[in-house]
Image: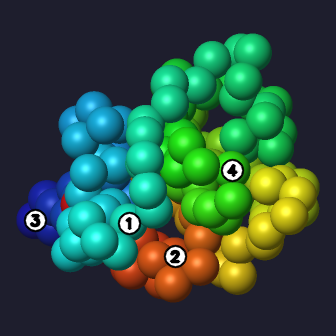
Amino acid sequence: MKKIAYLLCTIAFCFVLTGCGEKNIEGSLTDIMDKLYEGISEDEKPMMLENIPLDSENFAFYAFINTNYKEAIASESMTGSTPHSVVLIRLENASDSEQVVNDIKEKANPRKWICVEAENTYVLSKGDLVVLIMSNDLAPKIKENFEKLS
């Protein structure tokens, strides 16, 4: 009887441990990016906002680092005088997210637009996603929307 009780406790403990891990966010990066802008009116968004697919040639310009990733996009204003950038990165391995967040925090430059500077910079992760948010008034709302993703 004790063996069965120990076995059931062990199985229950395994379920508890696996339930505590952070799950990956499903959906395309474009769909996730749309969720990050939810609740922000078109008038509040920067002019000429566009999603830019990232590849090996432009990744480091937007993310400020080089790392292994599955896919990535950046959402930026096409006017150079607007300090706004949201970079979404889906990593190959979610276990790399803490290191990638730290690397980006260390190297991100909120003055990359030269004549303007983003007032707020956030680097966060959730599962296999990492987001870099550099913007002014929109940054806290985008950060909040990222934290709500499930």
Q: Secondary structure at mark 1?
A: loop
- Residue placed under numbered mark 4 in the picture: 80
For image coordinates 43% across by 40% down, the residue present is 50
Dot 3 crowding, Cα within 10 Å, few <14, some 14–19, many 20+: few
Is 76 located above or below residue 101 in the figure?
above
Dot 1 crowding, Cα within 10 Å, few <14, some 14–19, many 20+: some
**CB atoms at circles 1 and 4 under 8 Å apart?**
no
Which of marks 4 and 3 precedes in the sequence? 3
For image coordinates 51% across by 84% down, the residue present is 137
- Residue placed under numbered mark 3 in the picture: 1
Give the mark toward the camera: 2 or 1.
1
Tell me where residue 56 appears, x and y as whole percent.
Answer: 71, 15
Is 30 located above or below residue 137 in the figure?
above
- Of 25 and 115, nearer the camera is 115
Q: CA distance from mark 2 to mark 3?
A: 57 Å
Quadrant where the N terminus lies? Answer: bottom left
Is 90 located above or below residue 47 in the figure?
above
For image coordinates 68% across by 50% down, the residue present is 80
Q: Which mark is on residue 45?
A: 1
Give the mark toward the camera: 1 or 4.
4
Q: Is residue 100 at all visible to an observer of this figure?
A: yes
- Residue placed under numbered mark 2 in the picture: 139
Q: Secondary structure at mark 3?
A: loop
**CB atoms at circles 2 and 4 under 8 Å apart?**
no
Q: CA distance from mark 1 to mark 4?
A: 14 Å
